[in-house]
Image (spheres, grey):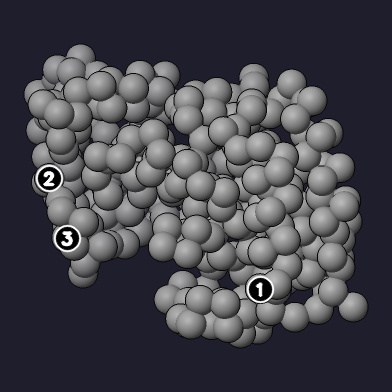
Amino acid sequence: MIRRNVTLAAMFVSILTMSSSIRATTFSDEDYREHIEKLEKRLPGEGFTIVIEKPFVVVGDEAPHVVRQRARRTVRWAVNLLKKDYFSDDPDRILDIWLFRDKESYETNAKRLFDKEPTTPFGYYSSKHRALVMNISTGGGTLVHEIVHPFIESNFEECPSWFNEGLASLYEHCSERRGKIYGNTNWRLKGLHKAINEEKLGSFADLCSTTTREFYGDKNGTNYAQARYLCFYLQERGLLRKYYHAFRHNVDTDPTGYKTLVATLGSPNMDDFQKRWEAYMLRLSPP
């Protein structure tokens, strides 16, 4: 039986609105109720649970208590901490987070809902379909990664792909320290080590100047790793939040973010800085 939780979801709206840990969105309780009514008609099968976790609506086909737990422990947690450091505005649309329980459910239902087979085994954000689509059996890291993208979209529209993905991928393995979200080392470090040791890593000027096509092109694995660990370095030096806000402020005159990066780092010789940064990265141990 399909779990049609419109009444329950309406209760969640009132509860979450009163919670001091969730900032109000631009959408009313009635907006969410209407959204859920339409959403229920699109559910791809039985056994789905719907939970409001502003500014998202979470839909999952695991056990109801598991879906609610993921909404609270991953979605709410990530949204609260990301908004603390970076984002003043919620997405300007109500977005759905689809949490499919395993590979088969993910592939089958993504195709059924969006008429397109996933190109990644983990998950993705589709602005067109107003949806974050996850194979949640692979873990919650990709979910946090993808949550960053709609917030970038609504807060930093001009953000280039390298920083959009660098910041998002930083949080695909993350934790909380002293009330702040922190990215931890992850599997991308091995690829970065390989690129550094084989002298195949471009300069930071090259990375910042990549177009969207170039970033996602043949060197996308290296580009992701370099962007992520540049953000990681800035984070560890207490400079990442400063860089994000300065880049966003300066984007009209510095659309690639490179000049702002140099200034944030204290205007070092960037060739020397990259050598020091690479040495620092090589001292880090992959998990």
Residue 97 placed where, x, y %? Answer: 62, 57
Q: Is residue 75 visible?
A: no
Q: Residue at x 64, y 26 (%)?
A: 23
Q: Residues within 10 Å of mark 2 (few under 14, many from 20)?
A: some
- The amino acid pointed to by label 2 is Ser
Q: Residue at x 42, y 58 (%)?
A: 127
Residue 178 placed where, x, y %? Answer: 64, 19
Please state which of the two labelled residues, at mark 3 or mark 1, is closer to the viewer: 1
Residue 92 placed where, x, y %? Answer: 47, 41
Tell me which corner region of the image, top left, top right, bottom left or bottom right, holds residue 35: bottom right
Mark 3 lies on a secondary structure that is helix
Residue 169 shows which numbered tag?
Answer: none
Inter-mark Cα distance, 3 to 1: 36 Å
Q: Residue at x 51, y 47 (%)?
A: 93
Inter-mark Cα distance, 2 to 1: 41 Å
What residue sits right under mark 1 in the picture? 42
Relative side of 276 to 165, left or right = left
Mark 2 lies on a secondary structure that is loop
Q: Is residue 225 above or below residue 156?
A: below
Residue 45 placed where, x, y %? Answer: 75, 80
What residue sits right under mark 3 in the picture? 214
- Observer-nearest of 44 and 213: 44
Q: Residue at x 59, y 25 (%)?
A: 180
Mark 1 lies on a secondary structure that is loop
